[in-house]
Amino acid sequence: MMPTSIPLDYYLILSAVLFVIGVVGVVTRRNAIIIFMSIELMLNAVNLSMVAFSSFLGDIAGQMFVFFIMAVAAAEAAIGLAIVLALFRNKQTVYVDEINLMKW
Amino acid sequence: MSLQSILFSIFAIGAVASAVFTITRKNPVASAMSLVAHFFMLTGLYLTLQAQFVAAVQVVVYAGAIMVLVVFVIMLLNVGREVQAPSARSLRPTLAMLISSILVVMVSSVIVSNPTGKNALSDKAVEIGTTASIGKALFTGYLFPFEAVSLLLLAALIGAVILAKRHVSETQS
């Protein structure tokens, strides 16, 4: 066993920074595909903190959750990109601010 | 400075830099490529946490499957460089900075209080990260969620096909 000198806080702060970068991406970008990638950034930030907790607490539950989050992320990727595709087919745009059908 | 902290610094800086690149590039393909780099940096971080199985799955599922899907859709839609919208652009960066600073304050206030008090990896970290122990837990304690995930993936598969296919009337005309 190789003990690490890095405390848990470092991983958690890194995870928080990555999550916030994802949030900024979702709020500032117009392209639906890049917004989608920013959501993946946020999911991965949470995964990082889960794995960090799992390894530091010696509990396998965190890594099981990461496994299930990855499965849900794969499902979400397929559905999300299909929605972008259907949207492009109907509206000829992937910019979210040009899609205002339900706005009044 | 130990090898562990050198590796952590490299992967952490790489992860943050590639994440910033992902959300700032105008060209969606450049964004996608930096996201792939980001996933590889996270793989390195998982390895510093002794989570071998998660690291392998990260490469296969995220950097492999999901990014192929994203790049494929970018090519299919032929999305070019993002152009600035003519109006209502001044508010968004301000809002983003506001939200992100609130989030940073909230999260770091919790982290700084150090709720777990852990400063080193658990002694069991190496053994729980292996494929054998993950597989054992998956097929014993987590069997029901595992089966539920298979149902979810089936539903997603059917849903994606139905959403993305052309309507019958459209193909006939």
Image (tube, rainbow, N blue to C red):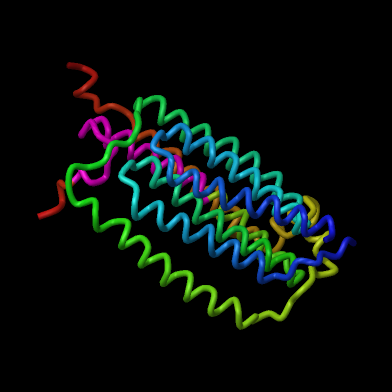
Horizontal and vertical percent for residue B52? 76, 50
- Answer left or right for B125 relative to A51: right
Residue B136 seen in the figure: no
User: Which residue is pictured at 54% across the width and 39% down the height?
Assistant: B34
Quadrant of the frame with the C terminus of chain B = top left
Q: Which residues are magenta?
A: A72-99
Q: Is residue B53 above or below residue B77?
A: below
Give residue A61's position: percent from left, percent from top. 67, 66
Residue B160 visible in rendering:
yes
Q: Residue furthest right?
A: A1
Rendering coords of residue B103 (x, y %) = 44, 70
Classify residue B158 by image quadrant.
top left
Identified at 79% across, 61% down, the residue is: B128
The answer to whether residue A94 is magenta is yes
Residue at the far top: name it: B173
Relative to the observer, which residue lies in front, B169 or B103? B103
Depth check: B167 or B59 in front?
B59
- Figure label count: 0
The residue shown at (59%, 67%) is A13
How would you classify the magenta stretch by its main secondary structure?
Answer: helix
Asked if residue A83 lies in the magenta stretch, the reply is yes
- For residue B91, side relative to residue B4 (left or right): left
Quadrant for residue B164, please give it.
top left
The answer to which of A27 and B163 lies nearer the viewer is A27
Residue B22 at x, y percent in the picture? 48, 44
Q: Look at 20% across and 34% down and name the residue there.
A: A91
Left-right relation of B14 to B72: right
**Quarter assignment of residue B1:** bottom right
